[in-house]
Every structure is written in structure tokens, then in C-alpha cells.
């Protein structure tokens, strides 16, 4: 799934997102994403009040969960390997479900490890993103 960036500042977000991602004292927060650029989504994270996309950061190539309103879906095709995880235990901010590559959705500690940017989890993220990019490119050639 490809996402086109439409905004990167807290002022672009709807109120319910700003309360969580740019609370008082952080109203000028700016994400390291580039307006107009397309990003490959590594996953979709759904909370009870908002949705985040997992992308690769511009500044340090680290994974980051970024508020969905910053993007428009440019290509809605999902990778063949993506899975769905209906979260069955309490997570902060009422995480409801995760859609993405197998490790992200298997209900193990991987999700937490990725949030904490543990090197082993980041390595898997980068490898899975490379696989998704290859799949997307291969599918695009078949559409020509």
C-alpha cells in the first residue's frame, strides 16, 4: 500500500489526533515526513479513536507509527503476506487491531519491540519493507 503525504505538522491533524500526538506544549510538532512524497506502508495500527500507518522515517530510516490523516492512499493494494491481529489484551490507548506483515501481527512481543526500536525488530521491519517494495514493483509491471 502506497501513501501520499499531505501534511506533516500538528496543525494539519484533526482535534482527536492532536490531543494525543500534539498535546499542549507540543502544538508546533512536526513529523519527519515530506509533503508530496509517497511512502510504503509497513502496517496499519487501529486504536479506538485513531489510525496510524507504519512507515520508514526520513531522517534515520527507523520505523515510525504516523497518524493516518497525514496521508492519502495512493495505491490500495495490500501485500500478499499481510495478516490481521485482533488485539485481545490491554494496550495503552485502546489498541484494537494491527494489519501488516506476519511478525507485526503474530501477537508476540515483536510489536512492543518495534515500538521500542529494538535492533532485531527494526531489522525484520526493514527486510519486510524491502519485500513489500519488490512485490509492489512486480505487480506494477504486470499491470502495464
Image: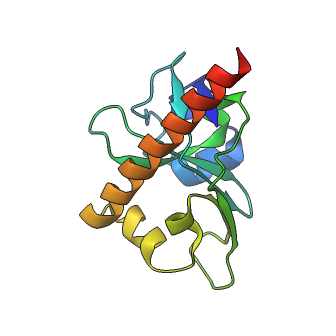
- Tell me if residue 36 comes above or below residue 134 in the rendering: above
State how many labels appear: 0
Name of the residue lying farthest toward the bottom: 89
Give the side of residue 112 with respect to residue 82, left or right: left
In-front residue for pair 69/139: 139
Color style of the picture: rainbow
Q: Toward which corner of the image does residue 60 lie, by quadrant?
A: top left
- Find residue 139 and report its horizontal and vertical position in percent: 65, 30
Q: Which residue is found at the position 48% from the left and 69% from the top?
A: 111
Give the side of residue 88 with respect to residue 105, left or right: right
Q: Which residue is found at the position 43% from the left and 35% from the top?
A: 31
- Find residue 114 and report its horizontal and vertical position in percent: 40, 63
- Tell me if residue 103 comes above or below residue 109 in the rendering: above
- Tell me if residue 17 comes above or below residue 30 in the rendering: below
Give the side of residue 25 with respect to residue 97, left or right: left
Whether residue 23 is visible to the viewer of this picture, yes or no, is no
In-front residue for pair 105/68: 105
- Find residue 46 and report its horizontal and vertical position in percent: 69, 59
Name the image quarter holding the C terminus.
top right
Give the side of residue 29 with respect to residue 48, left or right: left
Whether residue 91 is visible to the viewer of this picture, yes or no, is yes
Q: Which residue is found at the position 38% from the left and 38% from the top?
A: 57
Q: Toward which corner of the image does residue 49 lie, by quadrant?
A: bottom right
Name the image quarter holding the N terminus.
top right
Q: Which residue is found at the position 61% from the left and 51% from the top?
A: 19
- Find residue 135 and report its horizontal and vertical position in percent: 56, 38
Amino acid at each position: 500500500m502506497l501513501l501520499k503525504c499531505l501534511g506533516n505538522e500538528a496543525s494539519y491533524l484533526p482535534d482527536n489526533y492532536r490531543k494525543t500526538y500534539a498535546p499542549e506544549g507540543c502544538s508546533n510538532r512536526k513529523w519527519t515526513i515530506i509533503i508530496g512524497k509517497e511512502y510504503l506502508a509497513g502496517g496499519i495500527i487501529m486504536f479506538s479513536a485513531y489510525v496510524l500507518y507504519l512507515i520508514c522515517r526520513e531522517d534515520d530510516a527507523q520505523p515510525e507509527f504516523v497518524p493516518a490523516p497525514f496521508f492519502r492512499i495512493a495505491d490500495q493494494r495490500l501485500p500478499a503476506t499481510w495478516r490481521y491481529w485482533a488485539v485481545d489484551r490491554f494496550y495503552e490507548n485502546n489498541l484494537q487491531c494491527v494489519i501488516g506483515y506476519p511478525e507485526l501481527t503474530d501477537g508476540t512481543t515483536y510489536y512492543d519491540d518495534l515500538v521500542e526500536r529494538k535492533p532485531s525488530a527494526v531489522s525484520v521491519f526493514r527486510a519486510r519493507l524491502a519485500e513489500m517494495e519488490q512485490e509492489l514493483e512486480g505487480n506494477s509491471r504486470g499491470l502495464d
